[in-house]
Image (tube, grey):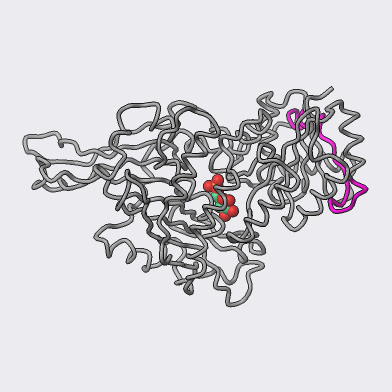
């Protein structure tokens, strides 16, 4: 007898291999999958043994976020309640098979459908679920997990939201942005609203500007087919980076609940001042990557400046950048504070340096506060020092993967760290003009900090990009 069935459409796809199976493995290891049955659906012919082998092989693939050794006993444990069903998701004959399975396992009407498949199949899946009365149940619950790409612009995102709303209610839909499942992003709320010390400083009276950075020291690998049609701004800008900014700048929710937190994130997304233009870049060898079209103008880097139009942040610039094949892999949000006019040590070397608060999302996860300290000795000399809260001190082993967190939340029916329809649309509303105003990407060297145009963007304001330090919270 199971409590519910997790049904994964597209179990042999990239998302399942790289994200879902590792998360399910970790959950099985931690006994977080009690009494559930899992169904994986794909078109490939596989018997039970071949499916088990597929799971094992997927778990042992090289994976940036899932590096620990794989224990065959845990794989066995995971496979015990995992069934493979071969079928075409757009053909009606698959759905009675699913229904039969739900009945057999006793999960009755409690189901999560995970769409790990191509968006062009959504329509057919929804129609089939509806015609077999599987999208809503009077007794029991049905939830749908869906993720990027949630449209390619505002108009297609609206269409997708409309399609979803024909078959599911908003309470049933769990739109994933896996950044919301990152411990370090969620910790921003605790840091800001669970302490009294910093929040009074989070406003234009104290802040000079904000930087949001997501850099990766690797390229697109084998994902050319997908990536070349979207580019960096759609791939991570429309979603992860805007959400990072929302967490760092949203107002305090009245309570820790899904409606309140979502409302506050949405307020920020809606108050972003449309940026006129973004700077785009492309790494030098991008055009040689697999499945990239010749003379591709796709961006692998972008940077732009915006403002938040509200009382708290009016007039404070926010600089956002992301890129592939950069000098380092680092994701962080930096709050750069103003230097008070009457600071005592301003005339001394380094005395004019600002305090900076850094939310280090990854790697070396933590929160760092840059302060000035006195250099020991007879002179009055200053040196920048770093006060650190580091996860490595809290947790000797790895933080839970975002997919593990988000699957657990969906199982519990908690939508706090999922996006609703309005958020996705607000994000596209902001990104659309930048896409419409696109210029050809500037070529940059692999292992650099991106094109010079990105430096110009911030330097013309008399500021510069912070160089992310590998020293923070070093493991
Ligand atoms: C994905 C993007 O959503 O996020 C990838 O498609 C990117 O291009 C990835 O590399 C970054 O996520 P993470 O968790 O590795 O920082």
Image: 81 above or below 185: above
Image: 391 above or below 342: above
Residue 75 forms part of the magenta stretch: yes
Q: Which residue is drawn at 70% across and 47% down?
A: 165
Residue 377 forms part of the magenta stretch: no
Tell me the quarter of the picture where residue 413 sits: top right
Can residue 79 be seen here? no
Q: Is residue 80 left or right of residue 382?
A: right
Can residue 221 be seen here? yes
**x%, y% of residue 263?**
50, 39
Image: 43 above or below 396: below
Q: Is residue 284 left or right of residue 45?
A: left
Between 183 and 420, the residue placed more toward the observer is 420
**x%, y% of residue 408?**
65, 31
Q: Residue at x 20, y 47 (%)?
A: 353
Span of residues in magenta: 73-94
**x%, y% of residue 361?**
45, 41
Between 315 and 417, the residue placed more toward the observer is 315
Q: For the N terminus, which image quadrant?
A: top right
Question: Which residue in the rendered view is the most extreme toward the bottom?
Answer: 295
Image: 239 above or below 170: below
Q: In this view, does 252 lie to the left or right of 116?
A: left
Q: Residue at x 84, y 50 (%)?
A: 89
């Amino acid at each position: 007898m199971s409590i519910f069935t997790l049904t994964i459409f597209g179990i042999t796809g990239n998302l399942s291999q790289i994200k879902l199976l590792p998360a399910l493995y970790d959950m099985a290891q931690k006994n977080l999958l009690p009494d559930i049955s899992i169904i994986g659906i794909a078109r490939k012919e596989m018997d039970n043994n071949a499916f088990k082998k597929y799971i094992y092989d997927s778990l042992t693939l090289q994976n940036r976020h899932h590096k620990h050794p794989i224990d065959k006993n845990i794989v066995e444990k995971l496979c015990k309640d995992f069934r493979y069903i071969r079928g075409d998701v757009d053909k009606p004959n698959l759905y009675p098979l699913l229904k039969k399975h739900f009945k057999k396992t006793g999960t009755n009407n409690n189901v999560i459908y995970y769409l790990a498949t191509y968006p062009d199949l959504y329509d057919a899946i929804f129609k089939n679920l509806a015609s077999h009365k599987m999208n809503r149940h009077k007794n029991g619950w049905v939830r749908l997990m869906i993720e990027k790409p949630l449209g390619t612009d505002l108009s297609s995102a609206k269409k997708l939201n409309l399609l979803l709303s024909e078959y599911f209610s908003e309470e049933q839909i769990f739109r994933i942005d896996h950044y919301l499942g990152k411990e370090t992003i969620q910790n921003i709320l605790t840091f800001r609203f669970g302490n009294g010390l910093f929040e009074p400083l989070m406003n234009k009276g104290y802040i000079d500007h904000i930087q949001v950075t997501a850099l990766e020291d690797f390229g697109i690998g084998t994902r050319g087919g997908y990536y070349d049609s979207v580019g960096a701004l759609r791939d991570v800008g429309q979603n992860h980076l805007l959400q990072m900014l929302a967490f760092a700048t949203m107002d305090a929710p009245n309570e820790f609940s899904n409606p309140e937190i979502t409302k506050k994130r949405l307020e920020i997304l809606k108050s972003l001042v449309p940026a006129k233009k973004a700077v785009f870049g492309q790494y030098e060898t991008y055009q040689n990557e697999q499945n990239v079209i010749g003379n591709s103008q796709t961006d692998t880097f972008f940077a732009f400046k915006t403002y938040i139009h509200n009382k708290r942040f009016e007039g404070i610039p926010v600089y956002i950048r992301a890129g592939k094949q950069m000098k380092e892999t680092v994701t962080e949000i930096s709050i750069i504070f103003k230097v008070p006019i009457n600071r005592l040590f301003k005339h001394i070397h380094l005395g004019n340096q600002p305090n900076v608060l850094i939310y280090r999302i990854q790697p070396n996860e933590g929160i760092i506060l840059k302060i000035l300290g006195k250099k020991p000795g007879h002179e009055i000399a200053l040196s920048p020092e770093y006060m650190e809260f580091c996860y490595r001190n809290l947790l000797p082993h790895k933080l839970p993967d975002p997919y593990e967190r988000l699957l657990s939340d969906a199982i519990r029916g908690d939508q706090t760290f999922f996006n609703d329809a309005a958020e996705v649309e607000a994000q596209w509303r902001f990104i659309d003009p930048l896409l419409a105003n696109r210029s050809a990407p500037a070529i940059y060297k692999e292992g650099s900090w991106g094109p010079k145009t990105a430096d110009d963007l911030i330097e013309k304001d008399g500021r510069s990009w912070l160089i992310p330090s590998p020293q923070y919270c070093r493991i």
